[in-house]
Image (tube, rainbow, N blue to C red):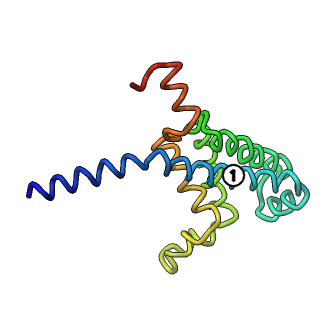
Amino acid sequence: MRALKHFYRGLIREGERIQGLLMLIIRIGVGFGFVLAGLGKFLNIDGATQFFESLGMPFPYYMVGLVSSIEFFCGITIFIGIGARLAALPLIVTMIGAYLTAHRESLFKIFEAPGLIFEQPPFLFLVGALLIFAYGPGFFSLDHMLRRYVFKEID
């Protein structure tokens, strides 16, 4: 029993040791993905507007501007790790909106084909934004440096 406790404590310690690196990897991937998605809409505003219009969205031109701005600017802040939790919130709302509009078929078929919801493009972005909101940007971030050296909240 003692050996099992020792093993388990070591496992927890090693898991906690890699948390900062894991959140860095998640933050870079999610942030970069959102920046690319937002930039893609900026660079093809006519095509994105037509797509939003085909979904029946009101004011599609302005919605493209709003969504692409959220994805681009919040993606940058998540990528560099400053205000990451705050930036994750509008991205979570945006990804839920993507499910409710462009990917709503996967929601309607949740009981017929439950795996379909996980195959949609917003899924990994939504999970990544939720992780960043819940766990923060991690040790390797400007948020962490501010908390530690400016606000002196971390020992």
User: Residue pushed farthest right?
Assistant: 46
- Image quarter (top left, top right, bottom left or bottom right) of the N terminus: bottom left
Q: Identify the secondary structure beneath mark 1.
A: helix
Q: Between 138 and 7, which is closer to the camera in this rendering?
A: 7
Which residue is located at x 17 percent, y 52 percent?
6
Residue at left offset 58%, top offset 72%: 119
What residue is disc 1 on?
A: 32
In the image, taking residue 56 as reference, residue 85 lies left or right, namely left
Residue in the picture at 50% in, 80% down: 112
Q: Position of residue 102 (x, y in %)?
A: 70, 64
Residue 71 left/right relative to 6: right
User: Percent x, y for residue 93?
Assistant: 61, 48
Left or right: where 1 falls relative to 104:
left
On the picture, is 139 further left or further right than 89?
A: left
Q: Position of residue 65 (x, y in %)?
A: 82, 46
Q: Quadrant of the C terminus?
A: top left
- Total number of numbered discs in the rendering: 1
Q: Amino acid at mark 1?
A: Phe
Quadrant hosting residue 118 = bottom right
Residue visible at 55% across and 53% down in the picture: 128
Q: Looking at the picture, how far across and down is residue 91, in whole percent?
A: 63, 47
> Looking at the image, which is closer to me, 145 or 35?
145
> Furthest-left residue in view?
1
Q: Residues within 10 Å of mark 1 (few under 14, many from 20)?
A: some
Image height of 71 relative to 86, above or below = below
